[in-house]
Image: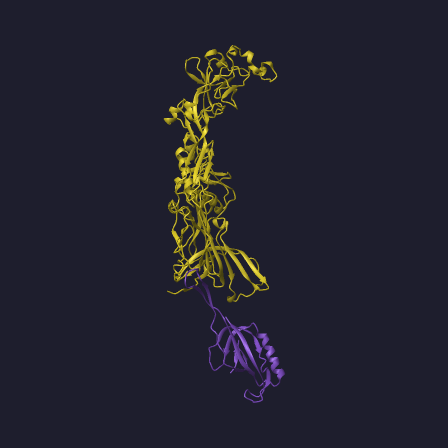
Chain colours: A purple, B yellow
Amino acid sequence: MSVTFDGEEIPGTVISFAVPPRELQARRTKFFGVNGESQITGGLGGRTLQIPMWLHSDAFNTANDLGTYIDSLDWFIGTTGVLDVDSPADHPQFDHCTFEGAVLMPDPGIIYDHAGGLGGHWIAFIVLQFRQH
Amino acid sequence: MSNSRAAPLFQVYLNGQLADGLRVLRVEESVNGSRLDFAEIELDWNQGFADVHDFTLPTGDDYIEIFRVIGATPVPVHFGKPTVVQPLLGPGGSGMRLISRIEQFHFGRPFDGAFEWNPTKKTATETGLDLRINPEIDGRMEGNRHPNKKETLGDYYYVLDPESTRTAASRTLQGVDDVPEVWTLTELIVYLCGSLNGSENNIRNPTRDELALVIDDNATPIRDFAIRFGDYLPTILDSLLTPRGYRWCVDKLGLGDRKIRIIRRNHGNVVHFPHQRSGANFDETLTQTESSGVRFDKSKLANSVTVRGHFCQVEFTAELQRAWPTHQDSLTSDELLWSEILDWDNALSDLRPVWRKWVLNEAGDYNDLRSDITEAFDMKPLFGDTLDMPRRRRLLPTLTLGKDGAPIGQVRGVFVEISDPNSEGAWIPLQASGCQLLRREAGIMFTGERIPNELRMQGEDAKLRVTATLQADFRVQGVAPRRATSPQADEAALIVVNDRQFQWRTVGATSQFQSDVQAKTRKSLERDDRAAIQAYAEDLREQFDVAAVNGQVTLEGTDHTNYKLGDLVTGISGRNISFSGSPLAGGLQFPQIAAIGYDVQRQRTTIALERPRRAIRV
C-alpha cells in the first residue's frame, strides 16, 4: 500500500492519517451593540495533507540507498498533480495537490527491518506533506 | 433567518466574452469627470498564470465589463478599458495587475470649434472660433442657437452667430425669421454630447426625453458660457453642470450598453443605510452599516442673503447748460479758434468752455455761474427720492437702440440735439463733428477748430439737449433674510455682487424715446431683474441655509443593489440618525451618493456622500 503522486509511486506502507476539512473563507463582522454577528462566505480554500508512511522497498539494500532516495524526493517539491493514497481508508484520490516535501522522522529514523514485516530491507518512517488547492 | 451569506461573484468580460482568468480586486464609480470610473483587476494565479515573462505593452482595443452576480442575476457595475498595466515582479512572486478605466477620450473627441451652418455651402462647418454660449454683447445677453438647423447624427442644433442676423437681409440669407434662439441647458447638453460624442462608440448620450425628467431649464439659464478648445466632454460637462447644481455619471445598463445620466441636486431615489439599535438581535437585512464618517458642518452656511446686481440706470432727455459766464456769450467764432485757446499757458485758455462746453450740472458745479443756473440737475424724475447725492456722473449710451442694434446716439451712443432755428421748441440731431463726451462729468465738449455755427448763429436762443443714460448710486438688489427654520441660530450673512447677471435699466419718462420703446416700435436694452434677483437671493438662501453633510459610509459586503449614484440618503435607519442638513426646514435636504466602491477582497462597499450646491455666480 503506497502513495502515488503525479504518476510516480513512493513505495511503502501508509499509516492511518487524518484528512482535515478544506478551509472556509469567511469574513465575520460584529456590529456594535447588536447581538450576533454577520458572516460572508467566500467559498472553500485548500487543506494540508500529511501522509505518514513506512518507506520500504526491495531496492533499499543499504541505509545509503534509502537516504539517497529520500533526498531525491526534493526534486518533486513544488510539483502539482494528483495524489492517490492506497490505504485502508480507501479515500478517493486528491486532485490539485502540491508536494511540499518529505519529513524523515527522527524516531526511529532509517533502520533495518530485522523482523522482516516490511520486506527485510532498510526502512524509514517519513511524513509526506501535500497542499491540496 | 441565517446570518451567513455567500459573497457575490464578480465576473469580468473581456471584449464581450467571459474571462475566467481575470479577478476583480476593486471597482469604483463616481459622479462627474474629475474621477472617472475604474476597476483594479489581476490575473488569477489559479488559472495557471504564475509568472511574468516576455511582456510588452498591449496595444489592442480591449474593453472590460464587470458584472456582480447577485443570486442568479448579473448586475453590471463597470465599463472601462485597460489603460494601466502593471507587470509585477518582486521577492513575493510575480503577476500582472491592470486598471480598467473610463478615460476622457472614451467620450468622443475634444472640442475643436463651434458647429455652424453655412448657408452658402449648405453644410455645417466646424469653425475655429471660440464658442461662448449665449454670449454677452454690449452688455446684453444674446442667444446663438440656430432656430431650425440641426445635425442628423447627434440631433443637435447648430450655432448661429448673432452678428450674422443683424438685418432682415442677413436673416434671409441665414434662412431664419428672427434672431438666434437662446440656448437652454437641455439643448446645450444635447449639442455637447451630440457634437463631441455623436458616434457613441463607447457610451451613449442622454435623450431629450431623459433630460426633460431631470433638468429645469427655467431655473438654470445659461449666460456667456465659454467652451475651451481641447476640452473633452467630461470636463465640459463638469464646468457646465456643477455650478448649476447638477452632476452626471455613466450608467452601466447591460453587456455592451452604457449611457450618460444627468443628476439633479435634491432629486433622486430616497434611500437609507440600515443599522439596528443596540440590544437587537442581528438581522442582515436590518444591519449592514459597518461604519459612518458622515460630518455635519453648519459653520459654512449662509442664512441671510443679499444679492446686489448692477447699478440702476435710467435713460433720460434733458437740456444741457452753458458752462461759461453770460458775458462771454458775445464772443465770436474767430475769437474762439481752438488752436489759439488750446494751449495751457495761453492767456486765452480760460475761453476753452465758451460755446463749446455744455453740461448737465449734476453736481452743482456751475450754480450761479449764470443767472439761469441756480441749482443742480434734479434727479428725482429719474430715480425718485432714493438718489439724493449730487455728485459728478458720466453720460452713458442710450438704452434705446437704432436699426443696427446699437445705441441710437450718434456721439458714442449719446443722442445730441440742438434747437431748431426754424421751429421754436423743436430739436434737430446734431450734425457738427468734433463733439466729444466729457470724461469726468455729464456733458459734451466741441473740440473742432471752430465752434458749431448752427449753435452760435442762434445766439441766446441756442439750446442743446441730450438723450443719454445716467447711472444711480444704488443697485438692484434681492434680500432673503434669516428664517426661523435655519439650523444656524446666529445670522450668517452672505452678500453677493452679481452685476453681470442682474440689472435694472429703464427708458425713463423724461426720455423722448419712451413712447416708442413702450410701443415696441424701437428696441432697447431695458431690463428689469428685480423679481429675478429676489428669486435668486431666495434660491441661494435655500441652498446655503443648510449644513454641509459630507463623508463616507462603509457597508459590510458587496452585494447591495439598492444604491446608485445620485440617490438621496436620508440617514441610518434603526439608529434614527438623520442626514438632513436642515431638519427644521424639511424637504429633501439630504446628501446624495457621489461615489460607490466595492472592495472585493475585504468584502466592503464604501459610499461617498456629498451635498451639491450651485455656485454663487454662474
Q: Is residue B320 visible?
A: yes
Q: Residue B543 falls in which quadrant of the image?
A: top left
Q: Looking at this view, is B76 or B403 the one in front?
A: B76
- Residue farthest to the right? A64
At horizontal 52% and vertical 42% (from top left) the residue drawn is: B229
Q: Position of residue A68 (x, y in %)?
A: 62, 80
- Can residue B54 be seen here? The reply is no
The residue furthest bottom is A115
Q: Quadrant of residue B255?
A: bottom left
| Above or below, A20 relative to B336 | below
Quarter holding the N terminus of chain B? bottom left
At 42% from the left edge and 23% from the top edge, which residue is drawn?
A: B380
Closest to the observer, A89 or B603? B603
In this rendered view, identify the residue nearer to me: B177 or A33. Answer: A33
B22 sits to left or right of B155? right
* Rendering quarter of residue B349: top right
Q: Position of residue A84 (x, y in %)?
A: 50, 78
Q: Does residue B424 sit above or below B566 in this rendering?
A: above
Tally of marks: 0
- Horizontal and vertical percent for residue B573? 39, 55
Location of residue B122 in the rendering, given as x and y in whole percent from the top left corner: 44, 39
Name above or below for residue B72 compared with residue A12: above
